[in-house]
Amino acid sequence: MQFALTLLLLAAVLALSWRFLGSYLEAVYSGRVRWLSGAERVAYRLLGVDPGREQRWREYAVSLALFSGASLLFTYALLRLQGQLPLNPQHLGAVSPLLSWNTAVSFLTNTNWQNYAGETTMSYLSQMAALTVQQFTSAAVGMAVAISLVRGFSRAGASTIGNFWVDTVRGCLYVLLPIAFVTGAVFVAQGAVQTLAGPVLIHDALNGATQLIPRGPVGFMESIKQLGTNGGGFFNANGADPLENPTQLTNLLSVALLLCIPVALTYTFGKMVGSRRQGLALLAAMGLIFAVWTGFTGYAESQPNPAVAAAGVVAQPQGNMEGKEVRFGVLDSTLYDVASTQTSTGSVDSTPDSYTPMGGFGLLTGMMLGEITPGGAGSGLYTLLLFAIVAVFIGGLMVGRTPEYLGKKIQAREVKLASLGVLVMPVAVLVITGIATALPAGRAGAFNSGPHGFTEILYALTSQGNNNGSAFAGLNGNTAFYNLAGGIDMLVGRFGVMLPVLALAGALAGKQAVPVSLGTFRTDNATFVVLLLGVILIVGGLTFFPALSLGPLLEQLSHGRFF
Amino acid sequence: MLRPPLSRGGHRGGRGVAQSRGLFDVAILKVALRGSVVKLDPRVQIRNPVMFVVLVGTGGTLAEAILHPSVFTWSITCWLFLTVLFANFAEAMAEGRGKAQADTLRRTRSETKARRLRADGSEELVPSAQLATGDLVVCEAGDLIPSDGEVIEGIASVDESAITGESAPVIRESGGDRSAVTGGTRVLSDRIVVRISAAAGNTFLDRMIALVEGANRQRTPNEIALSILLAALTVIFIPVVVSLYPFASYAHSPVSVVVLISLLVCLIPTTIGALLSAIGIAGMDRLVQRNVLAMSGRAVEAAGDVQTLLLDKTGTITLGNRMAAAFHPVAGCPERELAAAALLSSLADETPEGRSIVTLARERHDLAPTSAPSAAHFVPFSATTRMSGLDLPGRQVRKGAADAVRGWVTEQGGSIPADLEPAVQRLAAEGATPLVVADGPRVLGVVELKDVVKPGIRARFEELRQAGIRTVMITGDNPLTAATIAREAGVDDFLAEATPETKMRLIREEQEGGKLVAMTGDGTNDAPALAQADVGLAMNTGTQAAKEAGNMVDLDSSPTKLIDVVAVGKQLLITRGALTTFSIANDVAKYFAIVPALFASSYPQLQALNIMRLHSPQSAVLSAVIFNALVIVALIPLALRGVRWRPSSAAAILRRNLLIYGLGGVVTPFLGIKLIDLLLTALHAY
């Protein structure tokens, strides 16, 4: 009953953000929002950018690469030098080179995979200046790339797709900062820690124990962690830590925050291309998969844990409570984890490693679909549009016309770029997982053996390849092999998709639009949604079927039951 | 299948180039069988990445079969090899059909002697191969025209059946729009002088042979785009399968290379990969069967994209000529008197309009005379007088354009009745042509000539509208007349008082709006518009300039052919899309057949995924491979014939094809693989 109320509330918040945040985003990126124009001008002057000058896709991509390169270096340097820098009350030393590399890549790519425990590794300065800054900029970059692709559709005969610096600055300034500030205050008000005063020692006289309680600037990091679909928390326990995610309200707020931008962007898309229905069709495809996966995983977790049952605890009236917070219970925890794996956020308030095999299957496959349901801030929309282009091409042929999407003909160049963008992720994940399972260094990481151990490796590399950052746990990632391989996985999964997307934006913007007629293949109705789902599930999802059969499927079947 | 073309009357299958062949013509089958082996050359195979992967995979299983021989490895190797052969067969079969038609054409191209005119007017005999562009040759009754050219002197009837399949001779004359002659056709009567416009080896017939044969077939833009998608779908499955090797060894469940290769071949889109080029070749072939020659495959694809059809009114929308429909007497003249005068004036008028007046007068008023009185003198129609009629001793009867007859009557001192002008205006407003009839100075009334819209054309346009294709009627009529016919025929728009310039402007406007335009034309002044249009269908009866400018030639010269061309273009794309969808959807069942079999020995639990309950791991893999090979053969007829297209909205077509090829593609292999598995088990193969 209470969960139904949660869902209802969540649906209401998302509906509002779809309509109003969506239209606000459109206004932001078309330059009509100006309430912080003073700060905006300062930012452009510091960057040396002429905000009136638009860029061709190559210039846009070069700017993106320059900015990303600089961010990577800056983050890496800060982590390496944190021992000499202020705001380090615990006197933590430099982060090791490979871990710094992995972490810098991870926050640059909006992945927030953490091969470290925040409270014992990172100084406050590192958490704030290195990691939290990236949580803003990486989300803003993702949104910028998505908007530039949408401009490709909405423009005709244009050579430019916007200005990278302007899009990124506006996304940070008008969208991420204000929302993160307001909701960060809510987190703090609810009891999330926000201090620079360092950890406290607590002496428990009753039990005679002394405990060091880590603290830090947590509350405001928490809001952007969710809003920017980042997922990297201050503490190792992430959303399960009461100092990070104190109440049921903040738990629900987290879910709403991580879903709101990806959902709203479908409205922005519809508004920019001149038809809200087009955006609604994409949202429907996203929503259907999200709903089915939430139901499936929730059902799986409501079952008794077979491993616990095998150990003799047959009665598990609340379902599988292993690794879950009693504060949240099975359903709220599952909703949080499903939402975070399907949005490329990766934050957790319960441990995926302790999920039932089919529950873990739900989380893992949510990522394997390519982070499009609704996916990350920006990355969800642009990746889904790649699938939509493939679907339009196949479906468009079936009606007997050169396929066109939103009036733009989908020809050799578009098909090439879209297929490239679609296949980068599965190829990277499968190849690197293959290497990890073949090398002793890769095999050594998993705590478990057999199918569960395989799932631990597969989950880690799927999560990084999809820039999710969700950790299954049960894998020691802080090894030379996983720091290095994971970094490559994340870079390929991020920029291997972004570059084709920008090239696509350029190609589409230059095209003339074909007028719509009755002979036009419609992309705003139920038939298209079915076709799009078919392409996502068969082309995107089934590629992982053989691997899954050795992981969660085998594990589930080995417990003797299959539902 | 397609709706019977409106041009049925002009569509004479079974002769000339327009041969429609049975799907499994024995001669073609033989050629195709040979072709499927010849095409095994790796240099040919590499052009098709999907099938190349199958060929390489076959090499791998062959090596395995030689090193570790077993019934299973050899069976898999054979079936993988057959998969490649079947793909080659499909392509060879499509090519074979084109080649057979090219051979028919080639037989008509025999070495001839040409009678070349020297500068001084004398003739010399030279082999036609030595003719150069600009040479003048003489052709008389019985001569073969040595090369393409233009008649510059004389008029002749020519038998063009060699290229058109039409046995009735056609008239070719100097000047005007019927001056082009084609090499290889035969002069039946009279004498003409032809200026050669194409050197040997580059004639229309030569190009036609090359096209039909698919000798230097270029892949079309859409075909290239689809090939890229198929290559991507092949690339993606290589890591899927290769990574299974370390995964399996991590799981302590070694997998056989043969099974991995089988999985790879089953997952990559072999069905569409094998049939893709056959679909393209067959599309061209279907056009040829409709007696249309496309100069490039690109034009055929463009035809499927056409959103605006420019259709000539005469012959396409209306039945050729205007017909007399009614008599409208003025100034109290009895209708019978008007009819009699109109009849008299038309007795010697051999134009279709004139004859229709005679017919109407006889039917309505039972008027008898069949020939003009002997003393009569016929005054033919001329562009200056715009009247025709008959002079009898002491009596002059005229019919013609209203202002012309009015002028003539006034000249003779007659007066114009007050009710003439309203009658003329009313008829013109209705889209009819008013012909005023006068007997000397007395105006008798008006004959109403009307265009007769072809039966069924309205429904046809409605269908095209449903399919999102706009029809624009092109006519030289005035806007009022044009509007009436447009309304009656149900076209979306019309261009009245059309000139080559206004046509050109219309095409440009449509294209600037992003639309693709198709048109037909025959005259030299149509050439720029034909070249500008995305699909320019030139009439074979037209001038050489028109034929050069368009990207298709209609050998039947039937104006309705444009609609068929659009249908063929759409069919081509739909067939590709449908088979791609089918091919991708097939993967679902193949996963469920092979994946449980992969790890069956180590993890019998995975048999829960064996939802088809296949007999054994080996029979499961083999059944999937056999199904994958046989489905190619089963779909060859569909690839060659094309998926049917009927004009209807895109949404309806998509729903239908998604159901048949999408859902069907998911379900069929479940049934097929299970059936093959049952057969293998029954035969005790496993």
Image (tube, coloured by chain):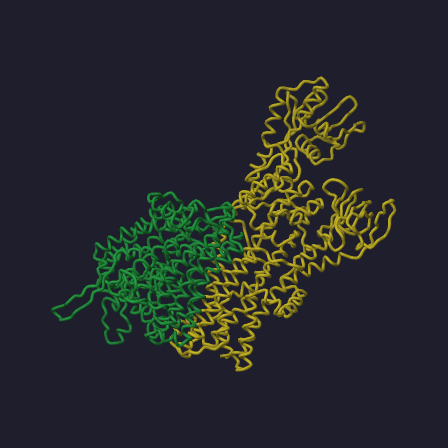
Chain colours: A green, B yellow
Describe residue B235's horizontal placement relative to residue A201 as left or right: right
Which of the pair B570/A187 is nearer the observer?
A: A187
Q: Is residue B368 above or below residue B598?
A: above
Which of the pair B147/A484 is nearer the observer?
A: A484
Which of the pair B513/A474 is nearer the observer?
A: A474
Q: Position of residue A355 (x, y in %)?
A: 30, 68
**Residue B99 is at least partly visible in this image:** yes
Q: What is the count of numbered marks? A: 0
Q: Quadrant of residue A534?
A: bottom left
Q: Quadrant of residue A121?
A: bottom left
Q: Quadrant of residue B83?
A: bottom right
Q: Position of residue A463 (x, y in %)?
A: 37, 65
Describe residue A268's horizontal placement relative to residue B38 as left or right: left
Q: Is residue B390 above or below residue A278?
A: above
Describe residue B314's horizontal placement relative to residue A531 as left or right: right
Describe residue B63's horizontal placement relative to residue B125 as left or right: left
